[in-house]
Every structure is written in structure tokens, then in C-alpha cells.
């Protein structure tokens, strides 16, 4: 598999291309199959889905909230997400179909139960999406499965990325990649911050760096490869005008194919190029200049806040907790919560701290509830 060859540094040739089908299948198995076929025809190496166990990923109130949106597939957010989830049998069917086409098949594991589900399915690698990049217990568990990992870093600080790398080091794991990602749909060119790819490569010299892009078009992703990204992930759609939150920033089959043809024409051994060389080569003017401008250290960008508020993970009570109690790890779960609680990266910081309020099971733990 090309991904393993890249992760094990056995080749400096080839960029591994992931078509992120995600939830662009509209909840329909036959659409998902058609997308797999089209991704193969476009020249992708892998098709990827998103796997959630809803009560494990979301709190009850996050699932019960009204989802008033033109992209909603249900009245509540829970009904919407349920509509978009495939069953185990459907996953097996999609996996078998991808295997027939000689295409890697995987999904992002959006909670610990989904991680077990994907490991049982024997996927070739596990994707950890940006929403879980600060979910350290999930990442720790993933690092112990003996499967390669591709970890996105949208909506996170450099400190969080450092922590991911230290979890990998503690697990003795080298077959993993970090993806530069900005979680805004679509990401404006000025927020793409592509130079962070070079920054990540300098800081983590032994780690393969990739790019998971949410911008419009293909030029910025080509630039990411010219900066040295060895794995590319883009959302994929049969038609950008369909209902659904991700279609607009997705690539249609012809666009995806044009991206892959362009990447295949690059002389990878001569990379990375400097920003001015990339602009001269791709000639895409202002958008590319904006995307290649260094706008500072890796941090949570303002354009990512809507996504972080909606899908970022919080600390919640794993059981009923009482005022005065000293918190232990087993008391705390990590979920998307409505409203948000303390962000997931504070998980290990709250051990041994005293609760100043009682909290019911599945309710968020907020900063004012803990004596720091
Ligand atoms: C951060 C993250 O998980 N992002 C994913 C991957 O990029 C997205 O596909 C979301 O699942 C999608 O945008 C959610 O849309 P809605 O809320 O309409 O189901
Ligand atoms: C959220 C995901 O990806 P990214 O953070 O790379 O957009 C995902 O793969 O589910």
C-alpha cells in the first residue's frame, strides 16, 4: 500500500490521495457506491467515510437540539446524524465493493466505540479528524491498535499538536501522519495558512505531513503538495449543488481527476519549493499568494470557531458527580456537548481537582465547576 510506503519512508515518490466521501452520500448506500466508483476512476488511492456511535460522540442534549438548517436531514441534530450513519452491514458492503476496485477503504473514528468498530473491520489505517485531535484518550487508544494513523490538526494549537506527537512517541509509534487542516467550510484562501506545512515539517522532522483541505478549487491543494505534503484529503461529491454542509467545498469527479493528474506531474524529488516558485509555477495569482502568506504560529483561527463550537469536543460527566468530589479520569468523558464544556485538551489537567458543583451524567463540566 502506498500509504505505508510513504509512512515508512520507503518511497519519496507518490502522494497518497484520499477522497473524503464523509457524509456526502446523502445517507444512501447506492450513492456511496457510485461515489466509490467515481473516486477510483478519478485516480484516488482511498475512499473515506465518517464513523460515529452517536451516544458515544454526542451528549443527549447535543443530539436533542433542533437543527434548523437547509442542510438538515432531521428535525434534531441527532435525527440528522442518524440519517447519515451507515450500519455495520452497509460498511461491510462498501468495504467489499472498494476492495473489488482495489481501493483502500477507511473512515474517521469519531469516538472510542467507532475506533473498535473500524479496527474490527480491519481497515488499512484509521483517520482521526480535527474534532478529535485534542481527544487525547482516543488518540492514545488508537496508537495501541497496531494500525497506521492519519491525524488532522484543524481547530488546534501547536501545543496540542506537540501532545499528539508525544503520545505517538510514548507508544513507540512511527507509522502515522499529521495533516495540516483549517476547519472552515469553505476555507478562504487567506486563512489556509499553507506555510504551516513547512512549519510542521521543520518541527516534526520524522513525521510525514499531509494536507486535508476545505477550500474551493484545486490550486491551493496543489501548492500544499509543492510545499511537501505527501498525503492529500479532499471532500468528494457527485454534485456540489446538493443538500449537505460539505458539498460546496468538495471536488466533483472531473475536478478531483484534474487535481490528481496535476499532482502526478510534479517532480516530487525536487520538492519542497519556495512560495515564490509555487506562485510562478501555478500562476494562480492573488488566491495562492494569500494562501501562501505566513500568518503566524499554529493556533485556533477565528474562522474555525463556528466548527469548533459545533463539533469540538468537551469534558462531560461520565456519571453523576457530586459537589466537593475530587475528579478522577473515570469520572470524565469526552463528547460534543451542547452547551460546550471545558475543551477536551484539559482532560489530564482536571485529575485530582475538586468539583465546586454537582453535575449530572452526560452534562458538560465547565471551568467554574472545577477548583483549579
Ligand atoms: C470537524 C468535522 O467533523 N468535520 C467533518 C470533516 O470535514 C465534516 O464533514 C462534518 O462532519 C460536517 O461538516 C458536519 O456537517 P453537519 O453538522 O451538517 O452534519
Ligand atoms: C473531520 C475530519 O477530517 P478533517 O479534520 O481532516 O477535515 C474527518 O476525517 O472526519
Image (spheres, helix red, strand yellow):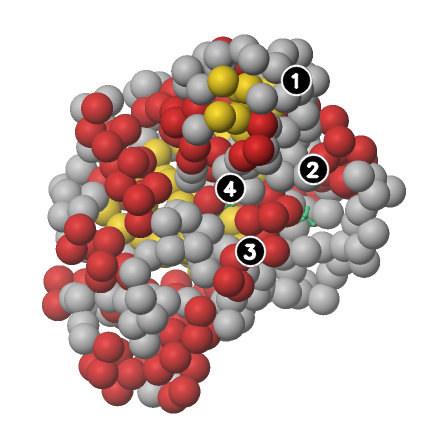
Question: Residue placed at 36% from the left, 67% from the top?
Answer: 193
Which of the labelled discs sits on residue 131, or is there none? 4
Question: What is the count of numbered marks?
Answer: 4
Question: Residue placed at 61% from the left, 56% from the top?
Answer: 306
Which of the labelled discs sits on residue 338, or is there none? 2
Q: Position of residue 219 (x, y in %)?
A: 41, 74
Q: Quadrant of residue 247?
A: bottom right
Q: In whole angstroms, how far apart are the C-alphas of marks 4 and 1?
A: 27 Å
Comparing 321 with 276, the one in front is 321
Judging by the rendered image, the residue that carries numbered circle 3 is 305
Comparing 317 with 247, the one in front is 317
Q: Residues within 10 Å of mark 3 (few under 14, many from 20)?
A: some
Judged by depth in the image, the label closer to the viewer, 4 or 1, is: 1
Badge 1 element: loop
Q: In whole angstroms, how far apart are the C-alphas of marks 4 and 3?
A: 12 Å
Looking at the image, is mark 1 or mark 2 earlier in the sequence?
A: 2
9 left or right of 343? Answer: left
Amino acid at each position: 500500500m502506498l500509504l505505508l510506503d510513504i509512512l515508512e519512508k520507503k518511497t519519496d515518490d507518490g502522494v497518497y490521495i484520499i477522497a473524503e466521501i464523509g457524509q456526502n452520500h446523502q445517507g444512501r448506500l447506492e450513492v456511496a457506491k457510485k461515489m466509490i466508483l467515481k473516486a477510483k476512476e478519478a485516480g484516488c488511492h482511498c475512499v473515506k467515510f465518517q464513523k460515529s456511535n452517536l451516544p458515544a460522540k454526542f451528549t443527549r442534549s447535543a443530539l436533542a437540539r433542533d437543527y434548523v438548517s437547509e442542510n438538515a436531514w432531521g428535525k434534531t441534530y441527532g435525527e440528522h446524524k442518524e440519517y447519515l450513519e451507515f450500519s455495520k452491514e452497509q460498511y461491510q458492503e462498501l468495504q467489499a465493493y472498494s476492495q473489488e476496485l482495489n481501493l483502500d477503504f477507511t473512515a474517521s473514528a469519531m469516538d472510542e466505540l467507532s475506533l473498535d468498530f473500524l479496527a474490527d473491520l480491519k481497515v488499512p489505517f484509521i483517520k482521526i479528524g480535527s474534532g478529535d485531535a485534542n481527544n487525547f484518550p482516543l488518540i492514545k487508544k488508537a496508537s495501541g491498535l497496531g494500525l497506521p494513523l492519519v491525524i488532522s490538526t484543524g481547530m488546534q494549537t501547536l501545543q496540542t499538536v506537540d501532545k499528539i506527537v508525544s503520545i505517538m512517541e510514548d507508544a513507540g509509534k512511527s507509522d502515522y501522519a499529521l495533516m495540516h487542516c483549517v476547519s472552515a467550510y469553505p476555507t478562504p484562501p487567506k486563512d489556509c495558512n499553507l506555510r504551516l506545512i513547512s512549519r510542521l515539517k521543520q518541527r516534526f522532522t520524522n513525521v510525514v505531513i499531509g494536507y486535508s483541505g476545505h477550500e474551493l478549487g484545486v490550486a491551493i491543494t496543489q501548492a500544499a503538495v509543492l510545499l511537501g505534503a505527501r498525503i492529500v484529503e479532499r471532500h468528494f461529491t457527485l454534485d456540489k449543488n446538493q443538500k449537505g454542509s460539505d458539498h460546496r467545498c468538495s471536488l466533483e469527479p472531473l475536478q478531483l481527476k484534474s487535481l490528481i493528474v496535476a499532482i502526478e506531474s510534479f517532480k516530487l524529488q525536487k520538492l519542497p519549493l519556495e512560495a515564490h516558485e509555487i506562485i510562478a509555477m501555478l500562476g494562480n495569482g492573488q488566491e495562492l499568494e494569500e494562501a501562501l502568506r505566513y500568518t503566524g504560529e499554529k493556533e485556533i483561527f477565528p474562522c474555525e470557531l463556528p466548527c469548533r463550537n459545533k463539533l469540538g469536543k468537551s469534558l462531560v460527566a461520565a456519571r453523576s458527580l457530586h459537589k466537593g468530589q475530587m475528579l478522577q479520569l473515570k469520572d470524565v468523558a469526552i463528547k460534543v456537548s451542547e452547551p460546550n464544556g471545558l475543551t477536551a485538551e484539559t482532560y489530564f489537567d482536571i485529575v485530582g481537582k475538586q468539583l465546586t458543583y454537582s453535575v449530572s451524567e452526560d452534562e458538560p463540566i465547565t471551568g467554574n465547576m472545577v477548583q483549579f
